[in-house]
Image (spheres, helix red, strand yellow):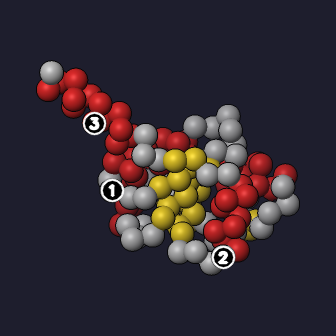
Amino acid sequence: MTQGTETNAKAVSTSNAKLITKEELNKKIQGNEPIQIVNVLDPKDYSLGFIKGSKRIPLDQLDARLGELDKSKEVVTYCAGSACNASKHAAELLVGKGFHVSAYEGGIKEWKEAGLPTEA
């Protein structure tokens, strides 16, 4: 019985990373909310561009670079787009480390298509 409880607790901890839409993320940015936006793409994909103000921490370096993030502020992870699952994996990793995280699965592709603020 204890074993089942542990499994359930683990499932709950990885599902704490919620999803955020481009509208919700843009509203947070426009409202100057204290959020950290993290691009978790591999550097070879940086040519896609970046959501304005985002940090560049590739998924495979995230665990080693946790010190660059502030646990007191919400983190929003993103990658290329809905076909890319790096943002979700990054969000789950960060939730496991005690961060408040949302994954933006639309990624830089959807963000740019919507004409929202980017940087090269």
N-terminal-most mark, 1 or 2 = 2
What separation in Å lies between label 3 and label 1 (alpha carbons)?
A: 14 Å
The N terminus appears in which quarter of the rendering? top left
Q: Single out the mark in the foreground, 3 or 1.
A: 3
What residue is rendered at 73% in x and 58% in y? 23
**Which percent across, then down, holds residue 70?**
40, 70
Q: Is residue 113 visible from the viewing direction of this image?
A: yes
What separation in Å lies between label 2 and label 3 (alpha carbons)?
A: 34 Å
What residue is rendered at 76% in x and 65% in y? 118
The answer to which quarter of the image holds residue 54 is: bottom right
What residue is rendered at 50% in x and 61% in y? 75
What separation in Å lies between label 1 and label 2 (alpha carbons)?
A: 25 Å
**Which percent across, then down, holds residue 99?**
38, 58
Residue lying farthest to the left in this orientation: 2
N-terminal-most mark, 3 or 1 = 3
The C terminus appears in which quarter of the rendering? bottom right
Disc 3 target residue:
9
Tell me the tag on residue 31: 2
Classify mark 1: helix, strand or loop. loop
